[in-house]
Amino acid sequence: MSERDEQFTRYVQGRREQLRRSALVLCGDPATAEDLVQTTLTKLYVAWPRVAAVSAQDAYARRVLVNAHIDLTRRPWWRRERSAGDDLPDLPARPTEVALENRDELADALAALPPAMRRVIVLRYLWDLGVAETADLLGISSGTVKSQTSKGLAYLARALSPGGSPDESREPEHSFDAQEVSR
């Protein structure tokens, strides 16, 4: 095995699960998430010499994953056949996080977000990216990232509150489309 292949294999072993969880949160379907990860890893392998030379593997992988999801959601058949929300895998809790009693509720609430808004939430809170990094990655303005984060978090808070009514936790009405937003 060449040194390039060994480096790539080590990278994949260390990041595959994080990529899979991110893809699962983005699309809500385990099979589709695995397809997104495979697409990401294939494109990363092809570009490996270039991205490894500048230590940009994570940034490149995130961009490919998000772009693959955007491409997928543009396909008309995907909107009809999208899964209604499979269970998310147990994620390791950070010491400062409060454990969620029902991860199914969180998965359902995330699945109800429009795909573009879900991408912002995933990049901000699963990948821990800042507003500027998220805006750059999605090709949108910082203001759009902030507003989508605010609307998404407000929706999730209503949907996950103990007495949240269906009227209060309805799907967010507005979301952006990355194609419609110009920098």
Image (tube, grey):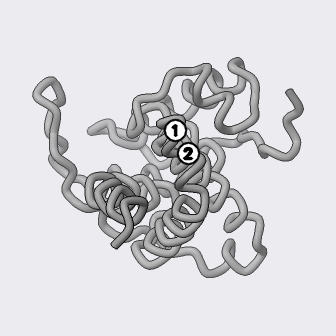
Q: Quadrant of the C terminus?
A: top right
Q: Residue 56 carries which label?
A: 1
> Dot 1: few (<14), some (14–19), or many (≥20) neighbours within 10 Å?
few
The residue lying toward the viewer, choosing from 50 and 147, is 50
At a point 34% along the width and 50% down the height, the residue shown is 106
Amino acid found under the numbered disc labelled 2: Val
The residue lying toward the viewer, choosing from 99 and 25, is 25
Q: Answer above or below: position of 103 versus 58.
A: below
At a point 52% along the width and 50% down the height, the residue shown is 61
Q: In which quarter of the image is the N terminus?
A: bottom left
The reply to whether callout 1 and callout 2 are in contact (CB within 8 Å) is yes
Relative to 176, 36 lies left or right: left
- The residue indicated by pointer 2 is 51
Residue 96 percent across, percent down from the top left: 15, 23
Relative to 24, 90 lies left or right: left
Task: State the SS at label 2.
Answer: helix
Residue 170 visible to the viewer? no
Q: Answer above or below: position of 55 versus 67.
A: above
At a point 15% along the width and 47% down the height, the residue shown is 101
The residue lying toward the viewer, choosing from 35 and 91, is 35
Residue at the extreme front: 2
Task: State the SS at label 1.
Answer: loop
Q: Distance between the residues labelled 1 and 2?
A: 5 Å
Residue 35 percent across, percent down from the top left: 51, 75
> Dot 2: few (<14), some (14–19), or many (≥20) neighbours within 10 Å?
some
Residue 125 percent across, percent down from the top left: 41, 33
Amino acid found under the numbered disc labelled 1: Ala
At a point 49% along the width and 72% down the height, the residue shown is 38
